[in-house]
Amino acid sequence: MSADSADAPTPPTTDSPAPSADSDLSGAPAPSEFVRLLRAQRVWDTELPDFAPVAAPAAPLPLFEQWFAEAVAAGQVEPHTMSLATADAGGLPDVRTVMLHGADREGWHFASHAGSRKGRHLAARPYAALGFYWPAQGRQIRVRGPVTVAPPEVAQADLHARSAGALASALVGRQSEVLDSYEELERASDTAWDRARREPDAPAPSWTVYVLAPDEVEFFQGDARRRHVRLTYRRREDGTWGRDLLWP
């Protein structure tokens, strides 16, 4: 650059407007009220338990049962609810919250109507993933594997072991179908409640129990210093379990 050009005045530019009331000093848009509210939320605002993976059992089920009992003792709200992820015939994913109905050596059990969206997904692609989140202790559990259908008698026994409301809901059926009006649901629900009270053993043929036999289970323990512990169990071909720690 020459001396003349160095002394020349810099022409004004229009590429960098002054920050407006809707932006910060960097020129970036100011956060919206929603974003401010979002950033103000606390994460794990409680004392988190320790987790020593070297002391974990050889199989995931005993550890799941232990963590579930500890979640209940810690006052975790609805620890038996979980996210269920499935995919349709084209591979598009979906997720919803459902209730755990049991966990044993066969797998993790849940139920729904065979004609529901999740039921259709599992008929087309019998593989799913489950996710438990227990913020009272900063814990997550992820389970995934193939899904099978339990015998009909198991499904009916499961249904009739639950409340009259659960039976009435099952008797309404038609889950995931288009509903023309809420009044139609009210009429069908009233009819189903009447039948559930009169016939506590009434069958709901579409009610189905599904069993996810895990081939992978991950236990996540949060840490206040972000040194989260992730312990993954993977089923070997001989049916035993291998264990690995994962970077958080």
Image: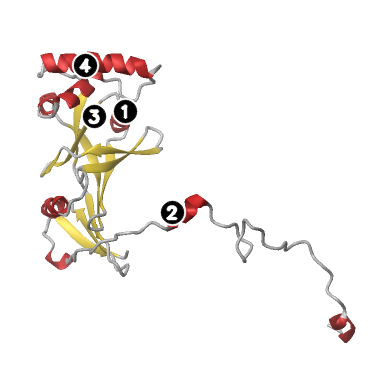
Label count reads 4
As drawn, the label of residue 38 is 2
- What is the distance, in whole Å, between disc 1 and disc 3 at their CAs? 11 Å
**The one of 103 and 240 positioned closer to us in this rendering:** 103
Residue type at tag 2? Leu
Q: Amino acid at mark 4?
A: Ala
225 horizontally vs 64: left or right? right
Camera sees residue 206:
no
Which residue has dot 4 on it?
Answer: 192
Residue designated by label 3: 112
- The image quadrant where one finds the C terminus is bottom left
Which comes sooner in the sequence, label 1 or label 2?
2
Q: Which of the two labelled residues, at mark 3 and mark 4, occupies the earlier sequence position? A: 3
Q: CA distance from mark 2 to mark 3?
A: 34 Å
Mark 4 and mark 1 lie on one chain; the one further toward the N terminus is 1
Three-letter amino acid code of the residue under disc 3: Ser
Distance from disc 2 to disc 4, alpha carbons, whole Å, reads 41 Å
Residue 107 disc label: none
In the rendered view, does 20 fall on the left or right side of 49?
A: right
**In the rendered image, which quarter is residue 190 located in?**
top left
The residue furthest right is 4
Residue identified by numbered label 1 = 120
Judging from the image, what secondary structure is the residue with disc 3 in?
strand
Residue 209 position, x and y percent, is 18, 31
Residue 19 visible at all: yes
